[in-house]
Structure formats: structure tokens, C-alpha cells
Image: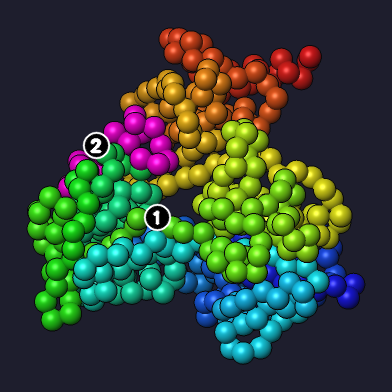
Amino acid sequence: MNERIVIVGAGQAGFQLVLSLRLAGYGGAIVLVGDEPGLPYQRPPLSKAYLLDKLPLSELIFRPEDFFVENRIQRIAATATAIDRKSRRVLLDRGDAVEYDRLVLAMGACRRELRVEGADLERVHGLATLGDADRLKSALRNGCRQTVIIGAGFVGLEFASVARHLGLDVTVVDAASRAMVRAVSPAVSAYFEAYHSQQGTRLLFGEGVGRITGLGGTVTGVETSSGQLLPADCVVTGIGVIPNDVLARDCGLEVDNGIIVDGQLTTSDPNIFAIGDCCNFLFDLAGTRCRLESVQNATDQARLLAARLAKGEHAQYSAVPWFWSDQGNLKLQIAGLAAGCDEFVELREANGLSVLCFRKGVLTSVESINRPADHMAARRLLASASRRPTPTEAARDGFVLKRFTADATAQNMTE
């Protein structure tokens, strides 16, 4: 094949597409453009195992250099600055351009910057890239004793667990009313809030950040919107991310909270595709468009697109999303999406909790804490055509999700 596929973005989605294309037998040229130096790497461990030195850099990278050489993958360390759709070229910040036959945008998302006075002080950290993690790791081992975390989402609370493990004084500040408010049910929020409080982390909800104070260019504290001054020699921000869709918007592609794609991940240009955190796609379970920040979503979209580009397959993307977050001794696993849910049923046991989330009486998501069997059952159930439990059934004494899933699946196979 004389065709060339150019992939902009060397994160989870971009690397998985490279791998899947070759596994699917694609023989054309592949160019992978990434704006970070070094080999493509995993990001989820950056806020956990990597900071604790439980995962070395050699195990963080997806594949060694030999993989790219042997599979004829051209890697370019540069930032894509523009797309010339007419001539099918991607312009790079180093002054040259790379031509494409088909282009895949897998640029992910960038962390949302905190725009308050003092945000540029020394020892104010974000946590999204390997460079961020290395700078934070150095700070943690060089005099950091009191840390304030701005944002009680996954990254903020994962880092809170790390900081407490290292013996730091930790305060988490969030303008929202509860932990992980955009991602989980109230019951799961409460469970994690109790856990972090027991570990010695101070949680402040309903508090914005007025400014970050400093002395001699280095952070000394955080002043909240109510005027509280929280001493800190290290501040970590985790206030969400923004899809990297500027490149797409500037070249005239349709964009709305990410790059708009159809069911086969094609943009408004038939020669350009988008996958991963930067794309806005139609989610079948919800019947609406959504954009997901998820390893599973990036991986599954890359595999589906590889089958299309290499083999001409035309399947619609319909994978059930799932997520996870490791916070100390707690492992949160989510199958499906709980957005818009209006009814919740809790399944509790001594060391864990599962919450079944319903929208207008239909099960659309299951959140599990230290209950992996429930998580796997939920993924199978949501991905199948089997009957789902009603809120009334789920609330009955003795209800077991794994058993219901097995029975529903068996019944579906006999019909």
C-alpha cells in the first residue's frame, strides 16, 4: 500500500491505533506525531504508582523503541500547528509539514488551568503529563510537608491518597458540594469522603479559591473564597480538562466540546477521523452525544477505527464505557454512564458498595467500590440485549447482580 496514515497525538488512543493497525495487517505508512519528547506512555499511573516509585519509567512506556522500528512507525516529536485540508498536510511547529492520505486526530485533552493570582508560583503543580509528575515527585521528596489540593475529582483524590501515604498534611478544596460530583452518585461520594477523612485528609466543599499566596516566588498558602487561609508548601490543581480541539476548529471541522464524529468516528471531513478524549461521539446507551476521558474509550475507539482503515469494516461504535479510580485501599469501578439518573439502589456489604443507577426506570450505570464481581456483571449486562433489573427488583432483599446477570443472559439465549 502506498497510503499514508498520519496520527496526531501519541497518547493512549494514538498508540493503540498504531498497534491495532499493524495487528490488523495494515501495510501502508504510519506517522505518529506527538508533542512530548520520549516514547508514548501510560497516564493513569502518574497520579498513583509512579509518584510512589512503585512503577518505574521503563514500565510506564507502552513499547520500547525497537517496536516502532520493527513495525515501520515513523515518530515525529513536534506540535501540530495547523491542518491544510486542501493539500492534505499537517503543519508542524518546527517549520515543516507531513502529508497524509488519511488523518486521525487523537490529541486527548489538556488540564484546565487555574486562573487566579499566584497560580504561577513555584510549587504549584498540575498533574497530567510525565513532566508534571516528575516535577511533583521532586517536590514531594524535597521539603514538601503541607499540601493543598484544588479539586476533588479523580486526580485530586488519587493524589490525596498518595500524599497521606507519604505522611503529608493534606487539605482538599472544591467549589462543588461533594466529591467527584460530575462522575458519581451521592452515595459513592459520601463513601469516599468518609474514607479520606478517616485517613486524615481535610475536605472543604463549597469553597472556591480566591488566590494563592507566596513569598519570594514560592507558594505559602491558598486563600479560599470565604477568606480562609490554608498554609501550603505545595499546591496541586485538578480542576478538570479541556478537549484539544483547536486544531480541528481552525481548519473548519465541526467542533462542540470536542471534535464531532459520526458512528464510525469520521469527522465532517471524510478523510479525517477523531478518537479518544478529544472527540464527541454518539453514545447509544444514553441516546445523546458525549465526550469521555477514559482509557477504555480511547482503546476501543482506536481498535474499531483500525479495523475500518485496515480492513474496510464499517461497524458503529457502541462500546459500553467503563472507568476506574484507585484511591488508597479503595478501588472504584464504573460501568455505563450515570448522567441524568434519577433513582439509585445501593447494594452494601462490610467492605464495599455498589450503586445501581437508573434513568426513568432503566439501569444505565453501576458504580462499584471493592466489588469487582458486580463491576464485571454490570459490564456484561449493559453490553447485552438481556433484560435489566428494575429499581424494585434491585431493592429486594437478597438481590445479587452477578446472579441476575447470569439468569438474564441465559434466558436471552433461549429466546
Q: Nearer the viewer, residue 289 or 178?
A: 289
Residue type, label 1 = Gly
Which residue is rendered at x = 62% and y = 34% of the image? Answer: 287
Q: Nearer the viewer, residue 64 or 382?
A: 382
Is residue 278 depicted above or below 334 in this figure?
below
* Image: 57 above or below 287: below
Q: Quadrant of the C terminus?
A: top right
Residue under the image location 47 percent in, 72 percent down: 57
Above or below for 372 versus 345: below
Mark 1: which secondary structure?
A: loop
| Residue 198 is a magenta residue | yes
- Location of residue 40 in the rendering, given as x and y in whole percent from the top left corner: 57, 71
- Please name the amino acid that badge 2 sits on: Ala
Residue on which the image places disc 2 = 194
- Disc 1: which residue: 240
Residue 87 is a magenta residue: no
* Residue placed most toward the observer, 85 or 167: 85
Q: Position of residue 297 (x, y in %)?
A: 60, 49
Question: Considering only order in the chain, which callout, 1 or 2, is on the residue closer to the N terminus?
Answer: 2
Q: Is residue 407 visible?
A: yes
Q: Left or right: where does residue 207 sit relative to residue 330?
A: left
Q: Residue 325: where, in percent of width, then height?
A: 42, 47
The magenta stretch spans which residues? 181-203
The part of the image, by quadrant, that contains residue 350 is: top left
Residue at position x 57%, y 44% from top?
A: 290
